[in-house]
Amino acid sequence: MKRIIVAITGASGTILGYKLLEALHNNKDVETYLVISQGAKTTLLDESNITVEQVEALADYVFDEYEMNAHISSGSYKTDGMVISPCSMKTLSALANAYDDNLIVRAADVCLKENRRVILSPREMPFNSIHLRNMKLCADAGYVIMPPVFTFYNKPQTMDDQINHFIGKILMQLDIEYSKFTPWRSQ
């Protein structure tokens, strides 16, 4: 069984974290650990009809963002990786500087130091030079930077098609199959 930490921060695009949790929830070989920031809770309500309770119901374990004694804050608790989607610029900055003032940043820092995959989905547009510098610092440290980027080779018809493709790309990084993902196939 894989143990995956999912964090949702207050950037626009909280649906991405929800859909990722939904995909992982439907995979019985995955156990999920959710940390959702207060900013994400507010953004979720602003952007969708999805409640915080619906998001939390998809996770096996749910932690408050300041629950610093959670087992996922320790490197001795083995997980198989972490995804922060969406990743706010505030969280990106904290990660770039190892400013572990909440469980999201602490869990990511722990995964990184234990050589576990950590995927960041920064959500901002356009990126300014500070955002880009922080992404570079994170990439140089070993984080995987995966902003939600449109694809067209899979001939998407809906926004759900785009989201499912993005979720599939994230899950590829964690070695998890996703039936709604359409990989590139040459003609």
Image (spheres, grey):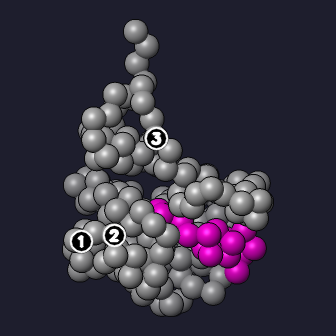
Mark 2 surroundings within 10 Å by alpha-carbon count, few (fewer than 14), some (14 through 19), many (20 or more): few
Task: Choose between 56 and 40: the one closer to the eye.
Answer: 40
Mark 1 surroundings within 10 Å by alpha-carbon count, few (fewer than 14), some (14 through 19), many (20 or more): some
Q: Is residue 119 visible?
A: no
The amino acid type, in three-letter code, at marker 3 is: Phe
The amino acid type, in three-letter code, at marker 2 is: Glu
Mark 3 surroundings within 10 Å by alpha-carbon count, few (fewer than 14), some (14 through 19), many (20 or more): few
Task: Choose between 3 and 185: the one closer to the eye.
Answer: 185
- Numbered range of the magenta stretch: 84-99
Q: Secondary structure at mark 1?
A: loop
- The dot on residue 50 is 1
- The dot on residue 150 is 3
Q: Quadrant of residue 113?
A: bottom right
Residue where numbered disc 2 is placed: 47
Judge whether residue 120 is colored magenta.
no
Which of label 2 and label 1 is nearer to you? 2
Q: Give the quadrant of the C terminus.
A: top left
The answer for how far apart the CA atoms under marks 3 and 1 are is 23 Å
Residue, x 26% and y 59% (percent of image)? 22
The answer for how far apart the CA atoms under marks 2 and 3 are is 19 Å
Please determine whether, in this image, residue 89 is positioned above or below residue 122: below
Q: Give the quadrant of the N terminus.
A: bottom left
Judge whether residue 92 is colored magenta.
yes
Residue, x 53% and y 76% (percent of image)? 104
Please determine whether, in this image, residue 84 is positioned above or below residue 144: below
Residue, x 56% and y 70% (percent of image)? 88
Q: Secondary structure at mark 2?
A: helix
Outermost front residue = 126
Residue, x 31% and y 46% (percent of image)? 159
